[in-house]
Amino acid sequence: MNSPNKLKIISWNLNHRTIEKPIPNEIAMFFEEYKPDIIALNEYVDGESRNEFKQELTELGYFHQLLSPKVGRQNQIFIASKNEITLGDIPAPDFTDPAKTNFLHVTMEETDLELVGFRAPFYKLASERNAYWKQVSEKIAGVSKRQILFLGDINYDPFKGASNSAPEIEFDLAGSFRIPNPEGEWSFISIDGKNKSRIDHAIVSDGVNVSNVKYLTVYNGITLAGSKSDSAITDHAVLSVDVEI
């Protein structure tokens, strides 16, 4: 059982790209065994085939489920929670369609904690990346007084060039926010297993205390993340964060 003074929150990139891929039974099995309080899925594609999955989540106690808007064939953010959540007031960046659909702000009725699940789209041009992060960092800086965390696939490693042993670093695009250093070697692995990186992170305001930040690639015999030869669920590790409330 999770501590009554903490919430266990996970973020997970399912690698659906723009396809309504089947959701394997092992995902619900993992949720049942790991018992996160809040689940934030990114690179998730919604559709009629998800009805059974959503019902499974409901049966596991995730009665509150919210989804970012659908635009064209873009993937989305899906958040499921055991505690009551409502849509927040922070709008998604409008730089591109993928930016619009890969951002979801929720507030929690029983605490002051707020959460944004998001995924930074993969932009090939530096000018596009900079424009996207300019919008996102302005949103983050604008809520620095709140108890809020942004978590998901940020598509770059903020610890690159910093000390690997640093417990956390300052989020350099907005003051009063920090990025805790997760336990684990990698959060993304290429299909051939040759390339690994740490691109899934939480960006946390000064008003939020977090602990036990880590990547999960295997749990109780379930291969959560790996290369093609690993027969894993996806190519991204689960990012798990405990948050004091």
Image (spheres, grey):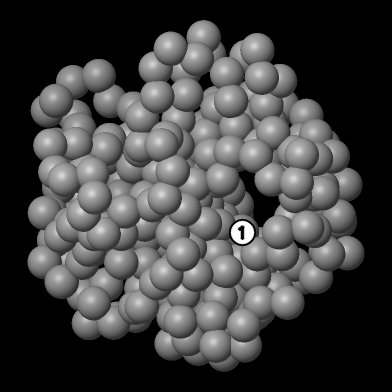
Most foreground residue, 90 or 129: 129
Most foreground residue, 183 or 15: 183
Residue farthest front in this picture: 165
Give the quadrant of residue 188. Answer: top left
Give the quadrant of residue 163. Answer: top left
Residue 154 appears in view: yes
Is residue 219 shown above or below 110? above
Q: Residue at x 57, y 69 (%)?
A: 8
Q: Position of residue 77 (x, y in %)?
A: 54, 48
Q: Is residue 129 left or right of residue 80?
A: left
Is residue 142 shown above or below 75? below
Q: Position of residue 164 (x, y in %)?
A: 23, 44
Q: Residue at x 80, y 34 (%)?
A: 24
Give the quadrant of residue 203. Answer: bottom left
Q: Is residue 24 left or right of residue 165?
A: right
Q: Secondary structure at mark 1?
A: strand
Q: Quadrant of the N terminus?
A: bottom right
Q: Residue at x 78, y 29 (%)?
A: 22
Q: Which residue is mark 1?
A: 39
Residue farthest top in this picture: 192
Q: Position of residue 199 (x, y in %)?
A: 35, 38
Most foreground residue, 175 or 55: 175
Question: Which amino acid does the dot numbered 1 rest on?
Answer: Ile
Q: Is residue 40 left or right of residue 120?
A: right
Residue 117 appears in view: no
Q: Position of residue 222 (x, y in %)?
A: 75, 38
Q: How many marks?
A: 1
Q: Residue at x 54, y 81 (%)?
A: 6
Q: Residues within 10 Å of mark 1 (few under 14, many from 20)?
A: many
